[in-house]
Amino acid sequence: MKVTQMKTLALSVPMDHPFLAPTGATNAKMNPVIVQLTTDEGLESFGICNTSNDVRVKSLKAILDDLAPVVIGQDVARINEAWQKLWTATGSMGHTGYGIYALSAIDNALWVLRAKMLNLPLSTLLGGYREKVPAYASYLLWRNWTIDQLQKDAADLVKQGFKAMKMRVGTYPFDVEVQRYKAVREAVGKDISILIDCNWAYTTTQAIQLGRMLDGLGVYWFEDPLVSDDPEQIAQVAAALDMPVTVGETWSTKYGFRTLFEKKSADIVMIDVQRVGGVTEWIRVANMAQAFNIPVASHLFDDISCHLVGAIPNGLWCEYMPWWDKIYKDPPKVKDGFIEIPKVPGIGLEFDPAALKKFEMK
């Protein structure tokens, strides 16, 4: 079975909960850029890469379009061959940023085709370890929320069945950040996991200082604490704190992650299917993490990431971030803290044609 057609579509989807990004800008729109593949036997699939706020969307789409000749004619069954062709084709761009985003979206679409070809859910094709995955709420509790908003939204998430949720720090003095965390803890009780994301806000000294103030208060993990991407500096933070340090969402490929593991920079590793190099590389990195006895969480893209976390024995959490659920007929849902993996070939999602038309960027 071979790929005979590739199309791309860029969208602008308004956010239900605009938030303050680490750059200081307000994120109000998400821009999923869709690549759609068709085979000579009539199977169809899609992959998604993403940017935000209607910025540089045309650039991302153009890279995808430029890769069409690499994909057309590709034998769907030849997994490593296809990935290596895309890796070579994007080499002159550098294997981070938009080049890897585009590679990943195409690789994801190819994997969905393979699953459909074999009449299997993607999670089963990749290993089939569990039928549902624990998911945490990540779309609320932002830095621009007031304490009252934090408490209200956190309590509402518990009522919806979430057993875990993420809040952000990095804006206020340390004593205020601790106060905000304690307010959320008060709202949800002691049995709910609270994950703290620093969004690369601190120096090594600052991260250790705030981390020690939070140690012992029931924080589930301390994510992306440093401005620096230096694995040795991150390792200093991890060694200084009792609570787990989680990093990885901005790393690309197995080569980047290998250094994180070797330097003992991560107690928990978070892998972004867009930045790492698609499903192919996500699984490679997850397997490498298992060799270091490190649990794996996914970053964003819960539509496909639930299949990835569900496929591996060291899968820990799927991040639930429903930024573009509006484009699906039946988007992923969290029930009692879990996403149930669809038991149909592929990833079990279909686009809503009316939504695609509504949100298409001209």
Image (tube, rainbow, N blue to C red):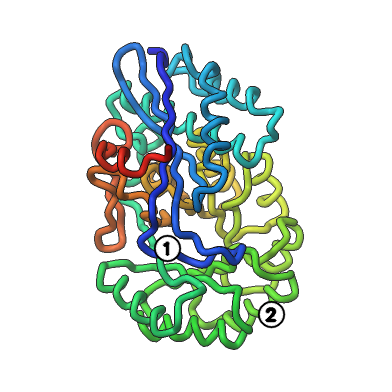
User: Is residue 57 found left or right of 112 in the rendered image?
Assistant: right
Residue at label 2? 209
Q: Nearer the viewer, residue 362 or 302?
A: 362
Q: Secondary structure beneath disc 1? A: loop
Residue ranking furthest to the front: 362
Picture coordinates of residue 28 (x, y %)? 45, 59
Looking at the image, can residue 244 be seen? Answer: no
Q: Is residue 172 above or below residue 345?
A: below
Residue at 49% x, 83% y is 180
Badge 2: how crowded within 10 Å, few (<14), some, or many (20+)? some
Residue at label 1? 138
Image quarter of residue 267: bottom right
Q: Quadrant of the C terminus?
A: top left
Q: Are marks 1 and 2 in contact (CB under 8 Å)?
A: no
Badge 1: how crowded within 10 Å, few (<14), some, or many (20+)? many
User: Is residue 60 found left or right of 354 in the rendered image?
Assistant: right
Q: Amino acid at mark 1?
A: Ser
Picture coordinates of residue 256 (x, y %)? 68, 44
Residue at 27% x, 25% y is 119
Picture coordinates of residue 299 (x, y %)? 49, 52
User: Is residue 306 found left or right of 19 in the rendered image?
Assistant: left
Image quarter of residue 115: top left
Q: Nearer the viewer, residue 358 or 224?
A: 358
Picture coordinates of residue 151 (x, y %)? 38, 81
Q: Amino acid at mark 2?
A: Gln
Camera-nearest label, 1 or 2? 1
Residue at 60% x, 76% y is 171
User: Is residue 209 found left or right of 283 in the rendered image?
Assistant: right
